[in-house]
Structure formats: structure tokens, C-alpha cells
Amino acid sequence: MGTKIQTARLVAFEHTRDGVSPLNSLLFIGGLGDGLLTVPYAQDLAAALPPSYSLIEVLLSSAFSGWGYSSISQDVEEMGQCVEYFQSLRPGGKIVLMGNSTGCQDVLGYLSFQGSRPKVDGGILQAPVSDRESIEMIYPATELRRYNGMAQQWVREGKGDHVLPNDVSLQLLGARVTANRWLSLTSPGPEHAGEDDMFSSDLGDERFQSTFGIAGKRGVALMILFSGNDAAVPKTVDKEALVARMEKAFMDAGGQLGKESGILPGASHTVKEEGEVRNEFLKRVRSFVEGLDIGTLGTN
């Protein structure tokens, strides 16, 4: 069962259960191209949460193909509206943000970007992978440099919000993409300054400190679930070392890390596997939110 919740611009879908009136909310944001029920574990996750929590899928304006015209900053602003709504709906309840794929950038952006937003209690990053490194596996290097050069030229000409030609952008998840969003995702070097570029394995510690570190300073709890068999991650990336760097930047700043944060063995990008792998994933999420609920989160 579910309940559709709609404001002037935004829609959220709450997975409801008979006889249960949860006080706390797990707000879920999918990745590029995702929308309602497109992530395969959504219904299982809704059923696995403790009775005190409800799963709410948030459909930002960037949902489905809208991401090509959007940005992480815009997502974060819209997420703030959603958090404020559920805080008013359930006074005193806890709110946890959870993202899959690029939804992880949204969650980390919410926890670390400058500006005033309603406070949340925790964040879960499921499959926090680098879009830049994933895109580099799709496009030949010479082709990618050419497309980046085109987008950079458009931005210099004041056309950053213009949509790139179809032969460029439609290769990327079948969506039309503005020059600004293209450069945010591909994040050309040497600066790699794209707003989406939060999880690349070649980023320096100072970049992780500017995201994970800021989130840690703000006193939020966090759990990272990095899929062990994520096809969107280059084989050259040391997943364990990368996650350890993320966790260290967060904890060194005073953040509270979920004790089951880390690699999820055998899991794909969206944990499409049923059985043992998905059950382990669901168990970790449930443990994290239960720990927040009763104040026994624990850290690694």
C-alpha cells in the first residue's frame, strides 16, 4: 500500500503498512533516471524497516529524465522542502535521508553544502560511486574530451543551460543533458570541479574533508554501503581503500559512523540480487535506523 503526498511542485510516495503509524521517516532519493519504484529493493526495504519508520520515495524535479536539466544544488533545495514537510507532519520524529547512486550526492550535498536547511538525524549512502569514472568507462577518451570541450565552450558563451546535441547526451542514460549538468558529471581535469564529483577515487583528502568532513562536523550519523560487485566502478578502484578514506574524513571531523558501514559483498549497483545479499543489505539499514531510534548507533 502507499500514500501519494503532493505539494505545489514536488511529489513523495509513502509506503504504508496496515495498523502501523510510524513517527520516523526514511526519505529515499534514487539515482539518474530513477523515479517511483524503479530501484528494485524499494518494496523490500519498506517492509524491512522497523514499525517506527516509514519509507518515503521522494520524486524531485530531477526524477526520471529531469536530471539532465537539474543540479545537485537544486535537488538539495527541494529535499529541504520535503524534510520541512515531514517534520511538520510528524513533530518530534526522526528523519533519515537515503540515496542510491547519484542520490548519494544529493544526500551528502544536503549534509555538507553551505546554507540553512532543516536538520536531519542521519544519512545512508548506497552505491556512492563516481559518475566521472563511470562515464569514462562509457565514452572513448578522445570522444569525451571533444564533448567536454564543446560543453565548456557553451558555458563560456553563456549557454550553460542549453541542451547538448542528441548524439552527445542521449548516450548517457538516454536523457537530454545541459552543458552545465554534463560538466558537473564529467568534471574535467585538472580541477575536477564538477558539483557531482564527490566520490572519485583520485580526489585528494581535502575534497573529502569538504564534503564528508563538513557532514561530520554537523553532528549527523552516516552509513556508507558500497556495493562489492558494482559494475559502475572501474576494476582499478580499490573499493575498501576508497570507503576507508570517506569514513575517515567523516569520523575525523566528529561524525558518528554506523557500525555496519562499509562494503556490501556480492551486491550490484542497485542490490538487484534477491536472497542473502539483499537480506544483508536490509539488515544493515534496519540496524542503522533502529540504532538512531533508540540511541545505540555505535561506530566502527
Image (tube, rainbow, N blue to C red):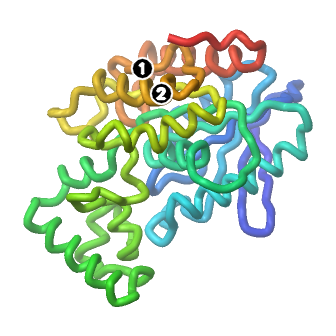
> Residue 22 falls in which quadrant of the image?
top right
Residue annotated with mark 1: 262
Is 116 on the left or on the right of 158, as rendered?
Answer: right
> Residue 227 falls in which quadrant of the image?
top left
Task: Choose between 191 and 140: the one closer to the eye.
Answer: 191
Task: Choose between 155 and 62: the one closer to the eye.
Answer: 155
Task: Choose between 45 and 296: the one closer to the eye.
Answer: 296
Residue 146 picture location, percent across and down: 15, 73
What element does badge 1 sit on? Answer: strand
1 and 2 marks in contact (CB < 8 Å):
yes
Residue annotated with mark 2: 224
Is 186 on the left or on the right of 119, as rendered?
Answer: left
Could you tell me which residue is drawn at 39 percent across and 86 percent down?
A: 159
Residue type highlighted by circle 2: Ile
Residue 158 picture location, percent across and down: 40, 88
Cα–Cα gap, marks 1 and 2: 6 Å
What element does badge 2 sit on? Answer: strand
Residue 276 picture location, percent across and down: 44, 13
Task: Choose between 36 and 102: the one closer to the eye.
Answer: 102
Could you tell me which residue is drawn at 51 percent across and 67 percent down?
A: 70
Could you tell me which residue is drawn at 79 percent across and 20 percent down?
A: 51
Mark 1, residues whose alpha carbon is within 10 Å: few (<14), some, or many (≥20)? many
Which of the labelled discs sits on residue 211, or is there none? none
Residue type highlighted by circle 1: Gly
Residue 181 picture location, percent across and down: 40, 68
Q: Quadrant of the N terminus?
A: top right
